[in-house]
Image: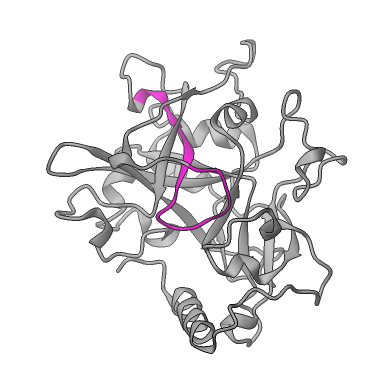
Amino acid sequence: MCGRTCLTLNPKEIQSCCKYKTTPDSKPKSPEYRNEFNCGRKYEPSYNIAPTDLSPVLVSAAHFDEQKDSAERTLVPMMWSMVPRWHKGDYKKHGLTTNNCRLESLAMSKLYGAPFKAGQRCIVLSEGFYEWQTTKVLKASDRPAFFVHMPQNEKVRMDDKTTWNLKEDGINLLKMAGLFDVWEDENGDKLYSYTVITFESNEKFSPIHHRLPAILDTEADVTAWLDYKRVGANRALNMLKPSEAIEWYPVSSLVNNSRNKSSECNKQIEPGQNQPTTPKSKLMQSWLIVKKRKFDDIDDDPK
């Protein structure tokens, strides 16, 4: 599954890292950035993005302008945790767990089936995501955390932004396949929201967790997933496979609390090393442990 991500770049920097070609011979171009109203909510760069936070995702530009080719791309801030368009009332109270959706039941799902068939495919961008090791019998509060990212230039360290050359090569962002939907309130204001597709882990990642986000390793995969007019739903679904390219390293338990947003969240630590992160209050310690355990035990199938 995927419960936390990291994206600290501003919109222009993200655009620079997402340059693409519409044809093999065309010049690289940056996707347009649309700053949607989203019921008054805004994207804020963060080392610890949690469900219900906003972050930019890639979609086909044809979703916003029918005159545009579906190979064109647009960046749009969306809320993590899909709000179904048929929900009535406060969007915060739909009562569904929608930060992840299972690939195995996606096409037949009442919640995800319609957006999928409508081509509402998106790519969730991040510098990496955090995962807790669940394959060992440990208390939720004791599970080691890892930062998962894509391979980078040998001079780039993901936990040291001074090694990033954003003006030239940028960094290799991690791109996860997702679905999005558009919900409207009683005033007609729209909220864009997304979910991350997950499936059974491959042999490489299974020692960490039994579920893995659908990560798109290549530019060809990105193009196919976004171009819903040329690549049909079934073909797009069948192309998703566990990533063999991802890398990861251990981080401190500071990331366990979604309110911790500092740059220490994705700092690499030595195995066995950790940093004190829980409050001194025993009541607060107990509350955080119970809250984390409930979060880990939630099945990401909305049914």
Indicate the position of residue 163 as horizontal and vertical percent values.
Answer: 82, 39
Magenta stretch containing residue 58, yes or no? Answer: yes
Observer-nearest of 72 and 239: 72
Magenta stretch containing residue 59, yes or no? Answer: yes
Quadrant in the rendering for residue 117: top left
Q: Is residue 270 left or right of residue 109?
A: right
The single residue placed furthest to the front in the displayed view is 280
Quadrant in the rendering for residue 35: top left
Q: Quadrant of the C terminus?
A: bottom left
Point 45% across, 78% down: residue: 291
Judge whether residue 117 can be spotted in this image. Answer: no
Q: What colour scheme does the image use? A: one colour
Indicate the position of residue 29 as horizontal and vertical percent values.
Answer: 59, 17
Point 36% across, 59% down: residue: 98
Q: Is residue 19 left or right of residue 295?
A: right
Q: Is residue 293 left or right of residue 262?
A: left
Indicate the position of residue 301 as horizontal and vertical percent values.
Answer: 37, 67
Observer-nearest of 33 and 275: 275
Indicate the position of residue 232 as horizontal and vertical percent values.
Answer: 39, 36
Judge whether residue 206 can be spotted in this image. Answer: yes
Point 70% across, 58% down: residue: 264
Magenta-drawn segment:
44-62
